[in-house]
Image (tube, rainbow, N blue to C red):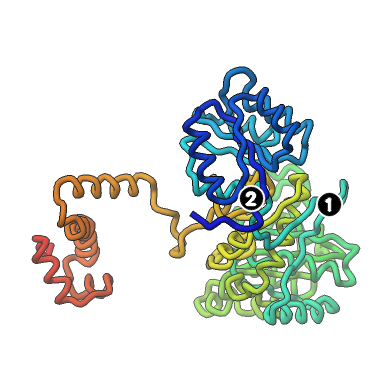
Amino acid sequence: MAEPSPAAEAAAILIVDDDAAVCWALEQVLRSQGYRVTIAADAAAARRLVRRARPDLVITDVRMPGESGLDLLAGLKQEYPGLPVVVTTAHGTMETAIEAVARGAFDYLPKPLDLDRTLDLVKRALGEDTLALAAQPLPDGAAVEATIIGSTPAMQEVYRRIAAAAATDLGVLVTGDSGTGKELVARALHRFSKRREGAFIAVNCGAMPEALVESELFGHEPGAFTDAKARKIGRVEAADGGTLFLDEVAELPPAAQVKLLRFLEDQRFTRVGGTAELRVDVRVIAATNRDLVRLTASGAFRDDLGYRLRVISIALPRLADRLDDLPALVRHILARAASRLGRSLALTDDALALLGRHSWPGNVRELKHVLEEAAVLATGGIIAPDHISLPTATGQAPPSSSLNAALAALSSRLFAQHAGEVHQRFLAAVEEPLLRAVLARTEGNQLRAAELLGINRITLKKRMDELGIGKG
């Protein structure tokens, strides 16, 4: 456990619980950290102590003689809105957790209590965690605009290219991994162009059924195909006077690529099933997370269309390549979340450090999802590491509870039956299925199996012999 901090010495905590053993355990651990602790066995006594001593934090059980802990919580939040209350219960149900949060609990802890987790929660409730970033909800009616955030050299180059391209009507190709903010760049180009008063029409080329791509882009006339009962205005026509954003443009099928190229030549097109040639005034911005150069080389994308689209190119960096922008991005995302949730939010130093160690394969979109989830889970408004859900460094989900349970059961059996040989037998039990799997994958080729495992072939052969594994 952590050493008591000077800042915690004056904090007063009231424990409300009719279980003397729980009260004793909590009192010991909290006093060891320098807190002043008072105990009440029921809600009535707790109300008197709160009025008399004004504690800094209340930790209350739910089920007690007389008034319940949830009713006590509701009363305390009405009389003392700023007093943090943590709810604990041995009868944890979904309904209890929801009701506790709805009535204003800072957080909810199931019994038996994890004392380290309880101490962490106490520190957050008392405001003793060092906070890295904070955000307040904006006044009613105000909104935090989605915008491009960052000041690293890579982002400065992005801004320079946006500024140069916005003043022109030339085609722009925005490239970057999924989640890097390609549509934000396209919207910025539109917002700072002479077309800002016109429409911004965004099209996800990868989300359109192949048979309907041309109709979606260029519209159709009645009777052009089955179910075409009325004229439809396509996205190109809808963007007249404004900007057409073609997201995931590399997903366009060959026929649509041909028609788009012809349109880009002179801004003329015909609706599907029509004969009249129409002309519009549209600026086209395209985006892709794929390598167009490689696609054109393989014939999957027309090289002449590629040249047309990337008159000006803007490449967006991965979040992992600009982690110095992480605090600014976090602050912006928290501000938007705070306004939607209607409460203040803060992120602890430990939580920010955890975010900084992640590789962010999903880029800013992944960061946004992680922080929005954490903001909802942090009912007390302070986001700590335990509110943040991240995959492991390999990008895989954390090991399943069933795997952990199986390994724990194996350990227990070895402790009981093979004392003094536990380590050796545990490794053998895990290693044998691994070696059988890799040999099956390489069809018994030991050299390839050793290379895949990253070990010497002689070592592999020795372990196979020791474990009684044949070449098959």
Q: Residue at x 88, y 62 (%)?
A: 198
Disc 1 on helix, strand or loop?
Answer: loop
Q: Residue at x 16, y 52 (%)?
A: 419
| Cα–Cα span, label 2 and label 1 | 23 Å
Q: Residue at x 64, y 55 (%)?
A: 371
Q: Is residue 433 visible?
A: no
User: Disc 2 marks which amino acid?
Assistant: Arg
In x, y percent, where is residue 173?
69, 74
Q: Nearer the viewer, residue 73 or 453?
A: 73
Q: Within the image, what quadrant is residue 84 found in?
A: top right
Disc on the earlier residue, 2 or 1: 2
User: Disc 1 marks which amino acid?
Assistant: Leu
> Where 134 falls versus 376 (above or below)?
below
Q: Which mark is residue 180?
A: none
Q: Nearer the viewer, residue 287 or 427?
A: 427
> Where 214 falls versus 412 (above or below)?
below
Dot 1 corresponds to which residue?
138
Q: Is residue 91 visible?
A: yes
In x, y percent, where is residue 23?
52, 34
Left or right of 71 in this view: 470: left
In x, y percent, where is residue 310?
69, 78
Q: Which mark is residue 124?
A: 2
Q: Within the image, what quadrant is residue 397 found in?
A: bottom left
Left or right of 339 in this view: 316: left
In x, y percent, where is residue 182?
68, 67
> Where 105 falls versus 285 (above or below)?
above
Disc 2 on helix, strand or loop?
Answer: helix
Q: Residues within 10 Å of mark 1 (few under 14, many from 20)?
A: some
Q: Residues within 10 Å of mark 2 (few under 14, many from 20)?
A: many
Q: Nearer the viewer, residue 325 or 29?
A: 29
Q: Residue at x 57, y 55 (%)?
A: 4
Q: Within the image, what quadrant is residue 315 found in?
A: bottom right
